[in-house]
């Protein structure tokens, strides 16, 4: 099944990449490596998914937010590869920042929301290295921010 068939089966529609909120670009490519800038969690209506894990958001909701970010990251990756996700050879690495209280220790479980979706969409090529960190705050009060590195053809 192609990437696009998997997206359709999952009822996922990709949006165009967001406009950068500061002095950066949404993605940069060097050789066959694409670096996707950090994307913050957004709700279905486009509003920022605000909150802090361990305070007013639980792990399950954080995982949903990370999944939503993965969908946005795939949309940006599609733009980076000229509209053809079949050019993606491998998702190489994710870095996840989880807005969390000092005693919250499930950042890795929150990040699974993104990792699991990338595996569903890209199969073995979606298996990646990863880091997940707890941080004191994320821009605009978002609960999660994730960046992605991919190898492309």
Image: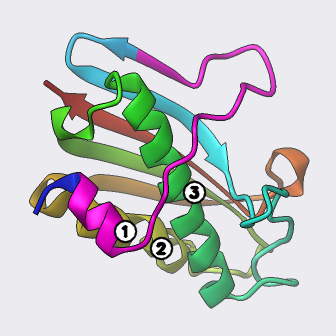
Would residue 144 appear left or right of 126 to someone viewing this image? right
- Residue 30 visible, this orientation: yes
Q: Position of residue 1 (x, y in %)?
A: 10, 63
Q: Quadrant of the C terminus?
A: top left
The residues tagged by marks 2 and 1 sit, at their Cα atoms, a distance apart of 6 Å
Element carrying mark 2: helix
Q: Nearer the viewer, residue 1 or 92?
A: 1
Question: Which range of residues does the magenta coloring cover?
Answer: 4-28
Would residue 73 appear left or right of 7 to someone viewing this image? right
Task: Please tell me whether residue 6 belongs to the stretch shown in magenta.
Answer: yes
* Mark 3 or mark 2, earlier in chain: 3
Q: Residue at x 50, y 60 (%)?
A: 132
Element carrying mark 1: helix
Q: Position of residue 30 (x, y in %)?
A: 31, 10
Q: Nearer the viewer, residue 73 or 82?
A: 82
- Residue 88 visible, this orientation: no
Q: Which residue is mark 3?
A: 69
As drawn, the label of residue 109 is: none
Above/below status of 58 relative to 18: below
Q: Which residue is mark 1?
A: 117
Q: Which residue is mark 2?
A: 113
């Amino acid at each position: 099944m192609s990437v696009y068939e998997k997206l359709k089966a999952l009822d996922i529609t990709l949006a165009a990449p967001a406009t950068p909120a500061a002095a950066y670009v949404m993605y940069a490519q060097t050789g066959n490596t694409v670096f996707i800038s950090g994307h913050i969690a957004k709700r279905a209506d486009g509003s920022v998914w605000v909150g802090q894990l361990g305070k007013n958001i639980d792990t399950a909701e954080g995982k949903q937010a990370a999944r939503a970010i993965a969908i946005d990251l795939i949309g940006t990756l599609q733009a980076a590869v000229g509209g053809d996700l079949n050019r993606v050879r491998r998702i190489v690495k994710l870095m996840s920042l989880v807005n969390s209280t000092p005693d919250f220790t499930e950042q890795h479980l929150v990040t699974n929301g993104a990792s699991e979706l990338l595996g569903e969409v890209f199969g073995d090529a979606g298996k990646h290295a990863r880091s997940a960190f707890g941080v004191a705050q994320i821009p605009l009060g978002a609960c999660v921010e994730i960046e992605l590195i991919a190898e492309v053809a």
